[in-house]
Amino acid sequence: MPRLLLIDPDRDGLDALHAALRRAGFDDVATVTSGAFALTTLERNRPDVIVSRAGVPDIDGYELCAIVRNDPSMTGVLFLLLEGPGDHAPEPRHEDKPDQVLAGDLPLATIVSAIAVLLQGDNATEADEAQVELAQSPTAEVAPAAPAEEPAPPGAFELMKLAEAMQEIVVGQKTGHLVLTLRSGRGVIVFERGKVVHAEFFGLIGETAFAALLVAAHGEAQGTFAFEALTALPANAMRTINRDLKQLLMSAAIGIDEGRTGAAVAPSRRRV
């Protein structure tokens, strides 16, 4: 289980992100409200990921990242920096840069998703294994869903058939909503010209929602899916995913292996 350290002077925001991570399956999470406390914590426990607000009064996130980068005992520790409006970002040396910077007032689900992606890395060579792992995961079949605007991909709820249905959408460069109906709730995966661009499930959005949806489907014996074809997405449609389908399936397979379901704590967002 990865170990995380969260640094945020805003106790309410810190507690909210901590809760979001725990509900997404991250149980080993330490929280501090200052840079000094962060350094003390780092002396005792080496985390896998540090998530720090840029605007920490005593030791800001930029300086803390530089300290971590120059400490040989912290080699390999990932650093995610959260910039708010008005945060002044100095130009760091290349070796002092964080692994990722997120700017703006972002939903918790986006931050959780970024942490998950950092931990997973971007190892596309393992992507093909994801479909095999999904195919080997035992699930029961149910009756197929009714077709939507055009004949839908097969609707029997085996994860391999679901993966094949998504591949069919990608190959056909289709646009629309792949709607999954589970006993635990309804989820949607949005495609635009054959690319996955958004997902929603139980309050989560983006890559986190995609992975949580497939993990939840694996854990249920019943469910249906159907593709609702569209000519084009609305102009204001949310686009929260920028990874290809194989990488997304790999992430879901990892979640299935670890037995996580990733419940939501982020506020609901508008549907596409």
Image: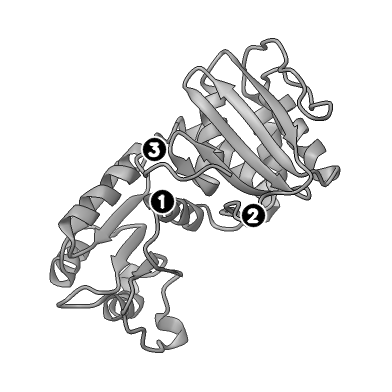
Between disc 3 and disc 1, the foreground one is 3
Q: Residues within 10 Å of mark 3 (few under 14, many from 20)?
A: many
SS state under label 3: loop
SS state under label 1: helix
The residue located at (68%, 34%) in the rendering is 178
The residue located at (31%, 79%) in the rendering is 87
Task: Name the amino acid, label 1.
Answer: Val
Instruction: From the top left corner, tell me how far across and down residue 28 is, in percent.
Output: 28, 45
Q: Which residue is mark 1?
A: 112
Q: CA distance from mark 2 to mark 3?
A: 21 Å
Instruction: From the top left corner, tell me how far across and down residue 131 is, in percent.
Output: 70, 36
Q: Is residue 239 above or below residue 39?
A: above
Q: Which residue is mark 2?
A: 243
Instruction: From the top left corner, tell me how far across and down residue 196 is, in percent.
Output: 67, 47
Q: Which residue is mark 3?
A: 264
Which image quadrant is residue 49 in? bottom left
Q: Are marks 2 and 1 in contact (CB under 8 Å)?
A: no
Q: Is residue 148 left or right of residue 157?
A: right
Q: Is residue 133 above or below residue 218?
A: below
Between disc 2 and disc 3, the foreground one is 3
Q: Residues within 10 Å of mark 2 (few under 14, many from 20)?
A: few
Earlier in the chain: of badge 2 and badge 1, it is 1
Which image quadrant is residue 140 in? top right
Which image quadrant is residue 74 in? bottom left
Task: Name the amino acid, label 3.
Answer: Ala
> Nearest the camera: 53 or 70?
53
Instruction: State which quarter of the image contains the N terminus.
Output: top left
